[in-house]
């Protein structure tokens, strides 16, 4: 049995027993919003949730009726994203240092080598953002999905511009550097707000990551305080990697939620 048939079945059973959604909540320890969305066919509940509902409604459901609702497994893209984030984190240290030197006219490494560092670092960050998009399939957060996709798009565009600047004489890195930094600052603020959307379920961890990401984004967006913003940015990115690892463990233990989480 799949959605929306399952939701209709649960709604029929509940009404047949003369129960309101609030009364059903008390019998199976779910929240009202989850019951509403299951009955409306908006979410696919886990097998243990179906079992709890059937037991609360005194209905002996068959294995076939719950076979389609297995606990989700973690996407391999999330593992790739975590590994890629670590590669990006260490390469970005060299990237930022060399970028400043190039802007100041000090080219201590070849442009080809610098281009390679930028490509490896950029791809690492893009895969990390894509992993956040995949994570929102397990822990829904519409703002995080939008923010990660926008950051991914910005990364593709600016990496392309950087490579043009390094491989041609059409533009120089310093010509647009502050515009690039400010644009990333805006998207970091957006991501930070999205991480705060998880605070009601995961408490302090996403709240700290969200605040640090917002602070670093504000510094980057202002431009003149961009280098000061590298301190909270470093802490924020470490926190983002840690948060992804934490959430991936939640999925691995079968604790992915049935209800939706939207950024506040």
Image (cartoon, grey):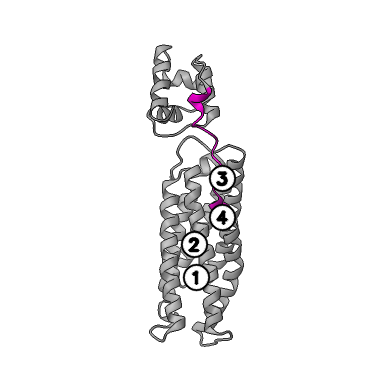
Q: Nearer the viewer, residue 157 or 1?
A: 1
SS category of the residue bearing label 3: loop
Labelled disc at residue 126: 2
Q: Residue at x 43, y 43 (%)?
A: 262
| Magenta region, residue range | 63-80
| Mark in the foreground, 3 or 2 | 3
| Mark in the foreground, 2 or 1 | 2
Kindly indicate whether the residue at mark 1 contacts the one at mark 2 (C-beta within 8 angstroms). Answer: no
Q: Residue at x 40, y 77 (%)?
A: 176
| Mark in the foreground, 2 or 4 | 2
| Mark in the foreground, 3 or 4 | 3
| Mark in the foreground, 1 or 3 | 3
Tell me the CA gap for discs 3 and 2: 19 Å
SS category of the residue bearing label 1: loop
Can residue 72 be found in the magenta stretch?
yes
Residue 121 horizontal/vertical position (percent): 54, 68
Q: How many marks?
A: 4
Q: Is residue 202 above or below residue 121?
A: above
Task: Tell which circle, 3 or 2, labels the residue nearer the N-terminal end.
Answer: 3
- Name the residue tied to disc 1: 226
Task: Residue 254: tell me if it is visible.
Answer: yes
Q: Residue at x 44, y 27 (%)?
A: 1
- Name the residue tied to disc 4: 240
């Amino acid at each position: 049995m799949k959605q929306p048939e399952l939701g209709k079945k649960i709604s029929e059973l509940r009404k047949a027993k003369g129960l309101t959604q609030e009364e059903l909540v008390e019998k199976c320890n779910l929240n009202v919003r989850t019951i509403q969305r299951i009955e409306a066919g908006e979410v696919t509940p886990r097998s243990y949730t179906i079992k709890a509902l059937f037991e609360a409604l005194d209905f002996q459901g068959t294995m076939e009726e719950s076979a389609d609702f297995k606990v989700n497994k973690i996407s391999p893209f999330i593992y790739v994203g975590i590994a890629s984030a670590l590669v990006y984190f260490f390469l970005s240290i060299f990237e930022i240092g060399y970028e400043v030197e190039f802007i100041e006219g000090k080219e201590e490494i070849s442009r080809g080598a610098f281009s390679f560092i930028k490509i490896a670092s950029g791809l690492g960050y893009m895969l990390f953002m894509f992993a956040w998009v995949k994570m929102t399939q397990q822990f829904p957060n519409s703002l995080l999905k939008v923010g990660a996709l926008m950051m991914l798009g910005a990364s593709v565009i600016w990496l392309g511009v950087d490579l043009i600047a390094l491989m041609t004489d059409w533009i120089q890195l310093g010509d647009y550097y502050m515009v690039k930094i400010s644009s990333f600052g805006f998207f970091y603020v957006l991501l930070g707000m999205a991480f705060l959307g998880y605070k009601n379920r995961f408490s302090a961890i996403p709240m700290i990551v969200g605040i640090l990401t917002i602070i670093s984004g504000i510094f980057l967006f202002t431009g003149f305080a961009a280098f000061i913003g590298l301190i909270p940015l470093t802490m924020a990115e470490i926190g983002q990697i840690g948060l992804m690892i934490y959430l991936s463990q939640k999925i691995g233990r079968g604790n992915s939620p049935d209800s939706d989480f939207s950024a506040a």
